[in-house]
Image (cartoon, rainbow, N blue to C red):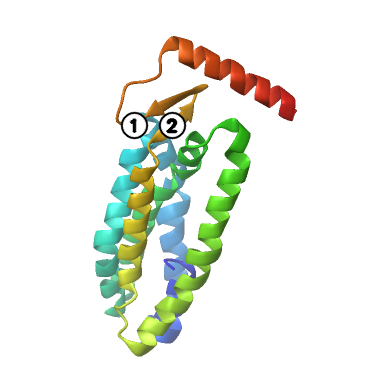
Amino acid sequence: LSFVWMAIFMQDLLDPAIPNAFWINAMAMFFGVTIPLPFVGMLSDYCGRMKTMVLGAVGVGVLGPLCLFVITQGQPVRAFFAQWFLGIMLALYGGPISAWLVERFPVKVRATSLSLGYDIAHCTASAFSPLVATYLVQRVSPVAPGAIYSLFAVLALVGMFMSTKIHQDGGLEDGASSPATETEMADATEEEEETEREII
């Protein structure tokens, strides 16, 4: 929605169109997502995955509609910075998500769980959000698709706070409680190593 659909929105759906919409889109994505993404991932190693991702989700949910409103004003420079800000917020969420997902599942079900959850989300939310956004622009108003940001942000936050278990270093930690004991950690490590040998 933020970079694939947005370029078409700025060029074809807005009247008057924003000049150089595809260049604005490309530069906002490069400086807002491509460059910051690995650094945000590193930041999450120090600050924690949840804190970084919550900041990104809240930023998108609260300020995403405002950014879309700024883009609808038709000023190229303002549109660039609004889309760049959206990119930064998405990077805060997307940078840690790969590591966060891996930590949420034990080895024996990790690949299946990740592929199902991640791909179902992509083929539903990512596939249909441009369609819904275009419909809202044509039938409601140009700023109406901003509600999609808030909706997905709420769903993301609910999902994060429902997934509090961390499968890491052979043990299971609860985000709200103390870590597992050394004996439990050792037993879990041995079990996961045995599972990995069977898989190999």
Residue 59 place in picture, x, y as percent: 28, 55
Q: Which residue is drawn at 46% across and 42% down?
A: 38
Question: Splitting the image into 4 quarters, where does residue 162 fall?
Answer: top left
Q: Which amino acid does label 2 sit on?
A: Ile
Picture quarter with the C terminus: top right
Residue 13 place in picture, x, y as percent: 41, 85
Q: Residue 51 carries which label?
A: none
| 49 up-or-down from 158: above or below | above
Dot 2 corresponds to which residue? 166
Q: Residue at x 38, y 49 (%)?
A: 159
Question: Splitting the image into 4 quarters, where does residue 119 fall?
Answer: bottom right
Q: Which residue is drawn at 62% across and 44% down?
A: 112
Q: Which amino acid does label 1 sit on?
A: Gly
| 176 up-or-down from 23: above or below | above
SS under mark 1: loop
Pick whichever of labels 1 and 2 is earlier in the sequence: 2
Dot 1 crowding, Cα within 10 Å, few <14, some 14–19, many 20+: few
Camera-side residue: 182 or 79? 182
Residue 39 place in picture, x, y as percent: 42, 40
Asked if marks 1 and 2 touch (Cβ < 8 Å), the reply is yes
Residue 80 place in picture, x, y as percent: 35, 67
| 107 up-or-down from 92: above or below | above
* 139 to the left or right of 195: left
Dot 1 corresponds to which residue? 175
Give the residue at the far top of this rendering: 183
Camera-side residue: 152 or 32? 152
* 134 to the left or right of 150: right
Dot 2 crowding, Cα within 10 Å, few <14, some 14–19, many 20+: many
SS under mark 2: strand
Res 79 seen here: no
